[in-house]
Amino acid sequence: MTRYLPYLLVGVLFGFILIKAETASWYRIQEMFHFQSFHMFGILFSAIATAFVAIQIIKRLGKRKALDGQAIDIPEKPSGRISYIAGGVIFGLGWGLIGLCPGPIFALVGTGSIGAIVVLAGALHGTWLYGALKHYLPH
């Protein structure tokens, strides 16, 4: 169990940062969807840039290993697929209707938010449902 402690601590720190950055704020999310504030867009764009740079570094350094010794392999994904568009629309609709990004769900549960517990239950149910219906869906 102690080998997972660093991951738990980084997760708690990340959750703390998400809460302090107001990424879990319903008002901030509504401002973003109404194009009234750059706050959330700035966070999203900086996350995309950071992920892009990290992936490019991993790809250019060749075969690297994760902390558990497994090789890091980032497969190429096909572009222009309708499933990406449909998935993005469903994700965006859920985000807009719930007013909560999936990222800070656990952080909000940690703060004691009852609404976040309901959203987490829905997210887990949706994940289970996708797994059950995956064979019947186009990929």
Image (cartoon, grey):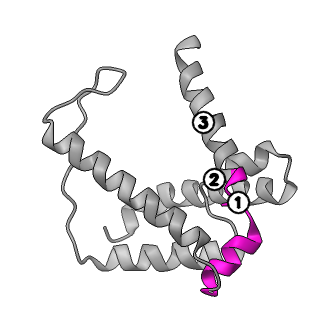
Q: How crowded is mark 1: few (under 14 residues within 10 Å), some or many (20 or more)?
A: some
Residue 16 falls left or right of residue 93: right
Does the residue at mark 2 contact the one at mark 1 (Cβ under 8 Å)?
Answer: no
- Say if the magenta span includes residue 58: no
Q: Quadrant of the C terminus?
A: bottom left
Q: Earlier in the sequence, mark 2 or mark 1?
A: 1
Residue closer to the observer: 1 or 19: 19
Residue 46, given in percent of the width and then of the height, sits at 45, 60
Looking at the picture, which amino acid does disc 3 mark?
A: Gly
Q: In which quarter of the image is the N terminus?
A: top right
Q: Which amino acid does label 2 sit on?
A: Leu
Q: Can the viewer see residue 74 in this picture?
A: no
Depth check, front residue: 99 or 54: 54
Q: Which of marks 3 and 2 is in front?
A: 3
Between label 2 and label 1, give the one nearer the viewer. 1
**Which amino acid, by three-letter code, is at mark 1?**
Glu
Helix, strand or loop at mark 2: helix
Q: Where is residue 110 in the image (x, y as percent from the top left)?
A: 78, 42
Counting residues from the start of the chain, the first of labels 3 and 2 encountered is: 3
Task: Check the image and report above or below for 8 versus 73.
Answer: above
The range drawn in magenta is 19-35
Disc 3 on helix, strand or loop? helix
Residue under the image location 71 percent in, 47 percent down: 107
- Relative to 35, residue 121 above or below: above
Disc 2 designates what residue? 124
Residue at image point 59% right, 79% down: 93
**Residue pointed to by mark 1:** 22
Q: Is residue 17 visible?
A: yes
Q: Distance between the residues labelled 1 and 3?
A: 17 Å
Secondary element at image label 1: loop
Which residue lies under the disc numbered 3? 11
Residue 56 location (% of width, % of height): 22, 49
